[in-house]
Image: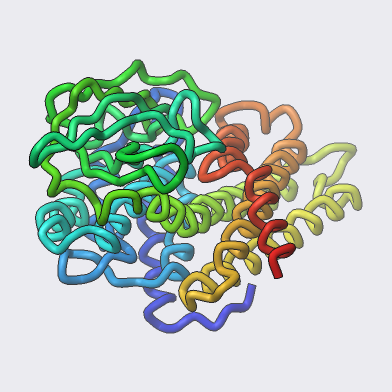
Amino acid sequence: MTVNLTSEQNLIRQTASSFAADRLRPFAAQWDENKHFPVDVIKSAAELGLAGLYVNEDVGGSGLTRFDAVLVFEQLSMGCVSTAAYISIHNMCCWMIDQFGAEALRQEWLPRLTSMELLASYCLTEPGSGSDAASLRTKAVKDGDDYVLNGGKAFISGAGVSDVYVVMARTGGEGAKGVSAFVVEKSDKGLSFGANEKKMGWNSQPTRQVIFEDVRIPASRRIGAEGDGFRFAMAGLDGGRLNIAACSLGGMQEALNKSLAYVKERKQFGQAIADFQATQFKLADMETETQSARATLYAAAQALDAKAPDATRWCAMAKRYVTDTGSKVANDALQLHGGYGYLADYGIERIVRDLRVHQILEGTNEVMRVIISRDLLRQ
């Protein structure tokens, strides 16, 4: 796609691409097979400014735009979708503290998060509240100068390894207005973790329940005012949806690239399968769909940067369309590879597995349709 990138954006894109080529792609299959969380490699991304992409520079962030971040995650995910996705979650946590936290909280935590001295996880989903996130049951009860947290979170990426958890907990009544946001540290007494979940994909990062049993934290670790947590969470998800869409975009582009190379080499009936019109039509559709996804995502990122009134709708549209399209293109790539696509050695089946969850997390694609249609009908 022809995009008028600035020289700085071209450099950002190339930096992420080089990191993916050198530090992610050569090891992604091994991490997937061994369920290995490559903490050392992830932390090395901070040296390139990739840990606080849209965090302010006074606390070690890179001060970039959401569009810049999309360029980064698109390239990183071409190396390893799963690892890129974790880095995107860490960035979302950093942004929430930077955007909504008190100055003392920003200065206490963000220099260590943007350097990846500390890794972060995002804790919204619970065993009983997925799409209905505002019904969360985890409680934070004020006790003097502290809050005491009780409850549990589910499907938390990085849980058990991450050092910092950005947690949504109920401080007031039912519904969204009763939710507040907190910073919880791994070493806080009463914090524990479930077993590492056995998953279809995203195997280069752990996924566990996070359990709070009388976890006492100082009130200074509340992010913003009481009752504003759900609003912060939803604002964070606008960017999170762009990031996960970017990870789908990179995954589908990698699958398409692999397919182009394969069909030129694979011969059947005395000729390369690239010479068959059926193959050519499939490739044409994959390229069209990939470029359409890229255009939608880039437009959504620009809308969020511009604080456009319909930015949330655009983020939902991009998340829905790009993640659905990513899974389709990756599955088409597997089909082009035939039986070899089903084997781990070719790297296609891993992309298929890793991309599938993108249609579920950061708000299911069914919920994205609700957001889009509500905004349309509100006009």
Give the x, y percent position of residue 141.
23, 33
Residue 157 located left or right of residue 59 = right
Q: Is residue 366 left or right of residue 308?
A: right
Q: Pick the residue in front: 115 or 274.
A: 115
Q: Quadrant of residue 27?
A: top left
Whether residue 78 is visible to the viewer of this picture, yes or no, is: no
Place of residue 352 in the rendered image (x, y in percent of width and height, measured from the top left): 62, 36
Query: Does any portion of residue 361 appear in the rendered image?
Result: yes
> Which residue is drawn at the image coordinates 18% and 44% (left, top)?
118
Residue 330 relative to residue 133: left or right: right
Residue 26 lies, with reference to residue 61, above or below; the image says: above
371 shown above or below 193: below
Quarter holding the C terminus?
A: bottom right
Residue 114 falls in image quadrant? bottom left
For the point 24% across and 52% down, which residue is it? 223
Q: Where's residue 38, x and y in %?
A: 30, 36
- Residue 138's place in the image compared with 292, above or below, is above
Which quadrant of the structure image shows residue 62? bottom left
Q: Residue at x 71, y 39 (%)?
A: 331
Left or right relative to 109: residue 252: right
